[in-house]
Amino acid sequence: MIFKIKKSKNYRPLLTVIIFMFLLIPSPIFSPTMQIRWHKEYEVLRHQALLYARSSGVRGDSETIKRAYDYSVRFWMRWPVVVRWIQAESDFIPSATSKVNAKGLTQVMTGTAAYIGEVLLYSGSVGLTIEEEEKLSEVSYNLYEVEDNLLLGFSYLKFLSIFSENPEEALARYLAGKKWVDFIDSRYVRSISDGKPITLDVAL
């Protein structure tokens, strides 16, 4: 029996025409004007976030507050909760150090930082970049450095909010680790939580 080989159709010319026509269609996504407008609108949001923090009594550096807002947007965490959280931890002071040697804006301890890195790398649930994963795996961070501290603090609280039954549990776990049950009704948790989720479909 002789089998005839069926020739496959060549769709390359048609695909080329479709791509060419697509490129001719004006798209706001690729428009420099749209990018500039989005940048301006986001700067307005950052300024509003700063004003909210100031109205809540935060005295920290303006750029530090705005960077915290950037992380709240990235990790889809509600800004009012973030303000109360970092205010309770360090009042937005990067050099803050607690009596138990917790460091920086989100008050992370050196030993806990290494544990956080392992948990985040193992779970892969908060959307870290390759560069950030490398930094965590190599333990090449400085807890007094704003970017490093915010990355560890935000990503870990986001992780806890995903795997906790409620926001109070997530905050208690952030504060006390394995002893979280004893702190779920603490003044710390009550001062930050408003009973609503820490993370939402929108940042604010």
Image (cartoon, grey):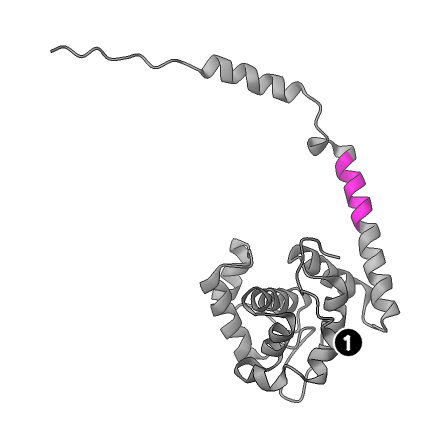
Question: Left or right: where does residue 179 sit relative to residue 200?
Answer: left
Q: Is residue 26 left or right of residue 45?
A: left
Q: Estimate how packed mark 1 is, as few (under 14), some (14 to 19) or many (20 or more) residues with alpha carbons within 10 Å.
A: many
Depth check, front residue: 149 or 202? 202
Quarter of the image where the C terminus is located = bottom right
Location of residue 33 in the rendering, given as x and y in whole percent from the top left corner: 79, 33
Label 1: element kind? loop
Q: Nearer the viewer, residue 51 or 186?
A: 186
Q: Is residue 147 above or below residue 2?
A: below
Q: Is residue 39 magenta?
A: yes
Which residue does the image show at 51% across and 68% down from the upper left?
Answer: 117
* Residue 96 in the image, given as x and y percentages of width and height: 71, 79
Q: Residue at x 83, y 67 (%)?
A: 53
* Res 96 seen here: no
Residue furthest to the left: 1
Q: Quadrant of residue 175?
A: bottom right
Give how far across and how far down residue 189 sits, in percent.
69, 79
- In the displayed orientation, state which residue is furthest to the bottom: 99
**Residue visible at 65% across and 77% down in the picture:** 107
Q: In the rendered structure, which amino acid carries the disc numbered 1?
A: Asp
Give the quadrant of the N terminus: top left
Q: Position of residue 201 (x, y in %)?
A: 67, 53
Number of callouts in the render?
A: 1
Q: Which residues are magenta?
A: 34-42
Can residue 192 be seen here?
yes
- State the predominant SS element of the stretch in magenta: helix
Identify the residue position indicated by label 1 in the image: 91
Instruction: Give the left or right position of residue 135, taking residue 98 as reference.
Output: left
Residue 35, picture quadrant: top right
The part of the image, by quadrant, that contains residue 72 is: bottom right
